[in-house]
Amino acid sequence: MTNKGLKIDGRRKLITEFVAQKGKVRVSELSEEFGTTGVTIRSDLAALEASGYLKRVPGGAIHNVNNFFNLNFFQRNQHNAEFKFEVGKTVSELVHDRDTLFINSGATTYYTAVALKKLKNLSIVTNSVSIAVELGAHLGFRVILLGGKLNPQYAFTYGADALEQLRRYKADVTILSIDGIHPKARFTTYHQDEAPIDREMILRSRRCIIAADHTKIGHESFFSVAEVPSTVTVVTNKCVDPDVLLTFRDKGFNIVT
């Protein structure tokens, strides 16, 4: 299927997706892809930059990290998918049959949930609609989806009702996807609504595993979730900067790659 001849809205939507997938696009490549002039593409990039979807650079545009968190859940699942899959598989190896788990929403925890299917007799409490659907039909798993308000863009529940229900449970392990973890010993997120859920999950479990691909390590997001507990294990992929990794380990972080 050709992308030539698309109307302006369709073209700009695809440009946004290309930037999210590739990290960087060039005017010449987009001009050829859409069969239009460089002037038209530059106009598209200017409009998308003004809306916060990307950042223009000489000859093209690059991914705007803030826009990543405006993508819907299913688009985010495809971003750095190979790294998230690696992390999810490693996290699943730290969980045992018959464990009780708290799992928050996120693309990395979604891939972790898929990897957990090799285990038996798990009990899972989650605020992620996607994870609840993924694991709910799996034989031998007991899955509880927290009620409350629904964030339809990112497919998670939150609010006072969700917190009240969460406080009825205790877990062996909390598995969290977060947007940033910094050596100053803070977990951070772009989603203020989900931060209280994450915090309560940490408090009500014996162990905490952070599932974070290398783009989250050393990064600080908008809203603080919690100080890093002594029981935390951070699982990331091998692309993480060795110097950043050393900084975390020097501060006593348990990092698994």
Image (cartoon, rainbow, N blue to C red):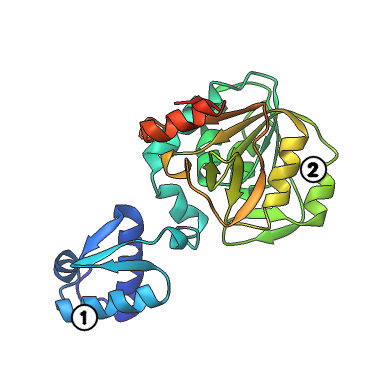
Q: Which of 131/89 is in front?
A: 89
Q: Amino acid at mark 1?
A: Thr
27, above or below 167, in the image: below
Q: Is residue 50 left or right of residue 212?
A: left
Q: Is residue 17 left or right of residue 104?
A: left
> Label 1's element?
helix
Q: Which of 209/224 is in front?
A: 224
166, above or below 150, in the image: above
Q: Which of 228/113 is in front?
A: 228
Location of residue 110 in the rendering, given as x and y in whole percent from the top left corner: 54, 41
Task: For label 1, count other residues whose C-alpha is less than 10 Å away and answer few (under 14), some (14-19) or many (20+).
Answer: some
Image quarter for residue 65?
bottom left
Task: For label 2, count other residues whose C-alpha is less than 10 Å away and answer few (under 14), some (14-19) or many (20+).
Answer: many
Which quadrant: the N terminus? bottom left
Residue at screen point 54% across, 42% down: 181
Q: Is residue 80 left or right of residue 44?
A: right
Which quadrant: the C terminus? top left
Residue at screen point 64% across, 43% down: 104
Q: Earlier in the sequence, mark 1 or mark 2?
A: 1
Location of residue 247 in the rendering, given as x and y in whole percent from the top left corner: 47, 32
Q: Is residue 27 left or right of residue 7?
A: left
76, above or below 43, in the image: above
Figure disc tally = 2
Real-space Cα distance between discs 1 and 2?
A: 51 Å
Residue indicated by mark 1: 40
Residue at screen point 35% across, 34% down: 239
> Label 2's element?
helix
Residue indicated by mark 2: 166
